[in-house]
Amino acid sequence: MNQITSEPVATTATTEVFPTYHAEDLTRGGIQARILLNGQIYSLRITRAGKLILTK
């Protein structure tokens, strides 16, 4: 999966930096993407209200 931005997002609790992705890029311009973790498939969906829903 490609990282979209070079601007890292730092947490306030630590100096740890996390990659940042645009949800629209993950869904390739659509409203849904599948994410694989430990052999399980999760569904990421962008709602009409612009919110994200992650389900198993």
Image: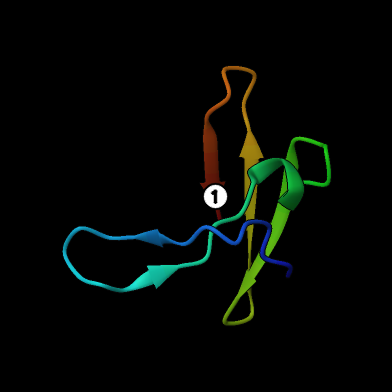
Residue where numbered disc 1 is placed: 55
Q: Residue 14 appears at what percent x and percent y? A: 20, 70
What crowding class fits label 1: few (fewer than 14 Cα within 10 Å), some (14-19), or many (20 or more)? few
Q: In the figure, residue 9 lies in which quadrant? A: bottom left
- Comparing 38 with 24, the one in front is 24
Q: Residue at 68%, 57% (x, y): give it.
A: 4
Q: Quarter holding the C terminus?
A: bottom right
Q: Residue at 82%, 37% (x, y): give it.
A: 30
In the rendered image, the vertical position of residue 40 relative to residue 55, given as above or below: below
Q: Residue 13 appears at what percent x and percent y? A: 16, 64
Q: Residue 7 appears at what percent x and percent y? A: 52, 57
Q: Residue at 31%, 74% (x, y): give it.
A: 16
Q: Is residue 5 left or right of residue 10?
A: right
Q: Is residue 44 left or right of residue 27?
A: left
Please, what is the three-letter code of the amino acid marked with disc 1?
Thr
The figure's colour scheme reads rainbow
- Which element type, helix, strand or loop, lies under badge 1? strand
In the rendered image, the vertical position of residue 23 relative to residue 46, given as above or below: below
In the rendered image, the vertical position of residue 32 relative to residue 14, given as above or below: above
What is the count of numbered marks? 1
The residue positioned farthest toward the front in the image shown: 7
Q: Is residue 13 left or right of residue 40?
A: left
Q: In the figure, residue 52 lies in which quadrant? A: top right
The residue positioned farthest toward the bottom in the image shown: 38
In the rendered image, the vertical position of residue 9 relative to residue 18, given as above or below: above
Q: Residue at 63%, 56% (x, y): give it.
A: 5
- Comparing 53 with 23, the one in front is 23
